[in-house]
Image (cartoon, rainbow, N blue to C red):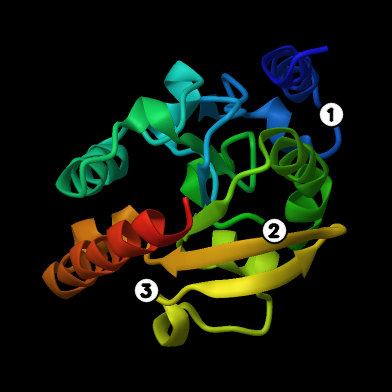
């Protein structure tokens, strides 16, 4: 079975998931998208309204900023894999609850295992906390954290603010662009 076939099978499981009640209020599951052989994986928090409508990750305003950030360092969106910790939209875009994160982490773990990225870029606090629960995004954004052990895998993590934070604050938007410039150098070094 190829990696892309494994991802397609996993998508079907995510679409039929009943591990938490979020599926009851969501229109679509949002498993993620991108290359199954991607060297870089971006992990956000949860789908928003636009993502719920389309079944695709990061397609609203925050997604447009993510595309702009990727373009600023010469990376095509199609060359990476983009997903979220949570695969169904929480009602009213509220933050995910701990039991929902625990229920969905099963799928994220399998995605990481199938894709086997060289680098994981976490978009915001919830993506970062999945790997680095004791850290604060304000203290470690824009820094590479190597040899993070998670679910039996050794991973390199690069936390950045969520693009939505850049939409709310010019200062955070500037930090995002600065962190992506650092990301470009890291990618050149390790990917």
**Quadrant in which residue 180 is drawn:** bottom left
Looking at the image, which is closer to me, 77 or 94?
77
Looking at the image, which is closer to me, 53 or 120?
120
Q: In the rendering, which numbered label is found on residue 97?
A: 2
Identify the element where label 1 is drawn. loop
From this view, report whether residue 151 is shown above or below residue 5: below
Residue placed at 63% from the left, 69% from the top?
Answer: 129
Q: In the rendering, which numbered label is found on residue 41?
A: none
Badge 1 density bin: few <14, some 14–19, many ≥20, Cα 10 Å: few
Q: Percent x, y for residue 87?
A: 64, 36
The Cα–Cα distance between marks 1 and 3, rounded to whole angstroms, is: 35 Å
Residue placed at 78% from the left, 68% from the top?
Answer: 149
Identify the element where label 2 is drawn. loop
Where does label 3 land, which residue? 142
Q: Percent x, y for residue 160?
A: 39, 66
Where does label 1 land, which residue? 18
From this view, report whether residue 33 is shown above or below residue 38: above
From this view, report whether residue 37 is shown above or below residue 126: above
The Cα–Cα distance between marks 1 and 2, rounded to whole angstroms, is: 15 Å
Marks 3 and 2, the one that precedes in the sequence = 2
Marks 1 and 3, the one that precedes in the sequence = 1
Badge 3 density bin: few <14, some 14–19, many ≥20, Cα 10 Å: many
Residue placed at 39% from the left, 55% from the top?
Answer: 187
Marks 1 and 2, the one that precedes in the sequence = 1
**Quadrant in which residue 27 is drawn:** top right
- Residue 59 visible (yes or no): no
Question: In what quadrant of the picture does the N terminus appear?
Answer: top right
Of all residues, the one furthest to the front in this rendering is 189
Q: Tell me: 170 left or right of 150.
A: left
**Quadrant in which residue 32 is drawn:** top right
């Amino acid at each position: 079975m190829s990696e892309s076939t494994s991802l397609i099978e996993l998508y079907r499981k995510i679409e039929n998931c009943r591990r938490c009640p979020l599926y009851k209020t969501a229109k679509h599951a949002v498993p993620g998208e991108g290359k199954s052989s991607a060297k870089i994986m971006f992990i956000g928090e949860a789908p928003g309204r636009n993502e719920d409508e389309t079944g695709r990750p990061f397609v609203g305003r925050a997604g447009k900023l993510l595309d702009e950030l990727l373009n600023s360092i010469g990376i095509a969106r199609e060359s990476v894999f983009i997903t979220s910790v949570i695969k169904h939209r929480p009602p009213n875009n509220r933050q995910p609850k701990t039991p929902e994160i625990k229920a969905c982490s099963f799928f994220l773990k399998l995605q990481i295992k199938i894709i086997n990225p060289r680098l994981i870029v976490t978009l915001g606090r919830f993506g970062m906390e999945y790997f680095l629960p004791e850290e604060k995004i304000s203290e470690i954004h824009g820094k590479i954290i190597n040899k993070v052990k998670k679910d039996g895998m050794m991973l390199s993590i690069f936390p950045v603010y969520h693009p939505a934070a850049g939409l709310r604050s010019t200062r955070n938007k500037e930090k995002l662009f600065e962190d992506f410039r650092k990301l470009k150098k890291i990618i050149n070094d390790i990917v």
